[in-house]
Image (spheres, rainbow, N blue to C red):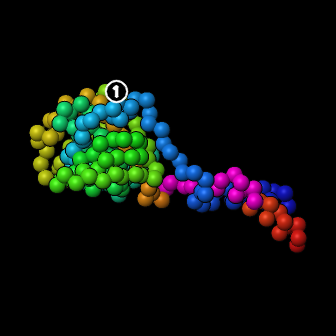
Amino acid sequence: MLHMLLLFHLQLRSFGSTSTEAPYEPVMPERCKYLQSSTEVMFQMCKGKFPLVAYTKFRDTFMKQTDRMALFMPKSLDHILVSLKESQLHYCHSIQVLEVNLYLCFDEFGGKRTVKLRSARMYCFPFHIQLTDDLMHECILERDGVSESELEANTLLTKRGIIHYTFDNDSSVRYILPKRNAIIQMLIALAVLFYF
């Protein structure tokens, strides 16, 4: 009987549920803070599907082959940001980083709106990374049917790489029950079991 209760308790804890607690506010990683002080806008250079080549080569556990991506670079070529998974950022002509999950989104006509993502992670590297080169190459190849473009050459000139994940629409993200809800459900289950 006790092992059944423990199993039931573990099952309760593993079920997904939207928390009534305050939403998680991601903290800007130290290596990414330069983006907050920058007034430079990053322009969307290419968007498409996450390529099989990158999926196989980098084995990113957050990604699936059907996921979307978009690549952004400022005119200075100081850095390149790859926005992975379906994101509102993919519909921006250019972006400016405010927080990990908060952006200014500009359209091609100069209109501006704020994009707040529910769940996001950002990883900044103080050096150029191979992933962005490969993603840009595959994206341009998919979009234009050719590679070795000026855009691809500019990607190689970037000094820092940024990987950004948006989990807003991702079914693989699970919301754990708040501790208080799990305890209440456990007490109800115990009461029902002891009643019968």
Q: Position of residue 39 (x, y in %)?
A: 27, 35
Q: Position of residue 42 (x, y in %)?
A: 24, 41
Quadrant into which the C terminus falls? bottom right
Query: In this view of the protein, which residue sits in the foreground, 7 or 56?
Result: 7
Instruction: Tell me if residue 136 comes above or below residue 12 in the rendering.
Output: above
Give the labeled residue for mark 1.
126
Image coordinates of residue 173 in percent, x first then y, are 50, 54
The one of 146 and 153 positioned closer to us in this rendering: 153
Mark 1: give few (<14), some (14-19) or many (20+) Cα within 10 Å: few
**Quadrant into which the N terminus falls:** bottom right
Q: Is residue 105 visible?
A: yes
Q: Is residue 86 left or right of 5 when viewed as pictured?
A: left
Residue at the bottom extreme of this rendering: 196
Quadrant in which residue 126 is drawn: top left
Residue drawn at x 80%, y 60% is 187
**Percent of width and height locating residue 12:** 69, 60
Is residue 148 among what the camera can see?
A: no
Residue at left 67%, top 56%?
A: 13
Between residues 138 and 100, which one lies in front from this camera angle? 100
Q: Amino acid at mark 1?
A: Pro
Mark 1 lies on a secondary structure that is loop
Residue at 12 percent across and 48 percent down: it is 146
Which residue is depicted at the point 15% across and 35% down?
A: 153
Say above or below: 76 vs 87. above
Vertical arrangement, residue 74 with respect to residue 51, above or below: above
Residue 5 falls within the magenta-colored stretch? no
Q: Tell me if 26 is positioned left or right of 140 in this view.
A: right
- Magenta part of the chain: 172-184
Residue 28 location, quadrant: top left
Is residue 165 toward the left or the right of residue 142 in the image?
right
